[in-house]
Amino acid sequence: MSWTTPLAQRVVNLKPSPTLAVDAKAKALKAQGADIINLSAGEPDFDTPDHIKEAAIKAIKDGFTKYTPVAGILELRQAIIDKLKRDYNVGYEPDQIVVSTGGKQGLYNCLQAIVDPGTEVIIPVPYWVSYPAMVELAGGRPVLLSSRPEKDFDIDLDELSSLINDKTRALIINSPSNPTGAVYSADTLKALAQMAVEKGFYIISDDIYDEIRFDGKSPENPVSVFPEAKEHIIVANGVSKTYAMTGWRIGYLAGPQPVIKAATKIQSQSTSNPNSIAQKAALAALAGPQECVKEMVKAFKERRDYIVERLNNIKGIKCNMPQGAFYVFPDVSSFFNKSADGFEIKGSLDLADYLLEKAKVACVPGIAFGDDRFIRFSYATDKAQINEGLNRLEEALERLS
Ligand SMILES: *Cc1c(COP(=O)(O)O)cnc(C)c1O
């Protein structure tokens, strides 16, 4: 009789990140020599600015290579406090900040800190792929809230209201959004914050794209528009997207002291402090010159204008104008139930597969974000690649009948 010691049920039920999987498949094909245009990446194509790299090199040379406080060095937490004051006009104390190994770990620790088995977390669709998985890992139940592209993926407050009950622990929002690029209005943010106070739940505001917005406005979140709700709002952010620092792994949480203390305790028993050298780099990013951010945002805006116009000129595609982040999320459902070259397109997964195999264009199927009608293209790649990718896309879509 053979015997296999089982794996934990929570990991058996866990799905691997589909965006990282697409990216891995595209990279593998590329490594085999295939001429792939990768429009699936979830990271800026720019290099980390030099002054940030220099700070890390200095940290190594100075021997800044030991454990730091679990929540991160005080100077970095102070720079985060200064940023939050500058952008949102809200004040935080150092014990209301915890620095983590990426924004992702901050979100994970936060959910571990507030979600009990049997409780619920409301997540608007389309959502960032990791939210439901993280809620489930904490033993909670993700409750999905639909949104409409015709309303620019705004939250329907009546529908949200109808989902709230005494098991509701939190609502997770992400504005600007991955994957849609939509930005919630100040009115929506304020209404959400008021509801959180009234009904007694947390809002986890994933602000990772807060600086990458194209309307020229400074960042907004539920705390900035309704500071009275501060005790109900947990801000999650990081340096990955704003400063082209995805590989450095620095993110943070800011929020009510009991939640931050709990998240720090979890971190103290799992990963301890985030990388000491990367903390110094993040400090240089947040406290240093911000021109690099403006330049990157300007480049993203030009690419957005180009890609949206071209997509909307392709028959059968409908694409909203994103107000932030670096993704477009067009409706491609008019191509479903068509076929070409032995590929039958039943949904977004089939379409993404067809595009990768036949057009050598990598993108992420909308089903990964909870809505099968769409696919996500990233424009965090140069104009020539975007242009070539769109040419191939156009041709491959035309062949479907
Ligand atoms: C990229 C991303 C994050 C976090 O990224 P890290 O690299 O872990 O800092 C969080 N939320 C969303 C929506 C993202 O796209």
Image (cartoon, helix red, strand yellow):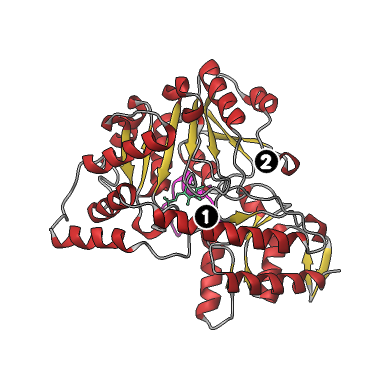
Residue 204 falls within the magenta-colored stretch: no
Image coordinates of residue 212 in percent, x first then y, are: 51, 50
Image coordinates of residue 199 in percent, x first then y, are: 55, 17
Residue at mark 2: 153
Q: Is residue 154 left or right of residue 291?
A: right
For the residues marked 2 and 1, what is the alpha-carbon distance in whole angstroms? 23 Å
Q: Which residues are magenta?
A: 1-19
Image coordinates of residue 261 in percent, x first then y, are: 30, 30
Image coordinates of residue 319 in percent, x first then y, are: 72, 54
Q: Is residue 125 left or right of residue 55?
A: right
The relative height of residue 124 versus residue 199 in the rendered view (above or below) is below
**Residue 292 visible:** yes
| Foreground: disc 2 or disc 1 | 2
Q: Quadrant of residue 358?
A: bottom right
Q: In the image shown, does 245 or 369 lie closer to the viewer? A: 245
Q: Residue furthest left?
A: 63
Magenta span: predominant SS is loop
Residue at mark 1: 17
> What amino acid is found at the position of numbered circle 1 in the picture?
Ser
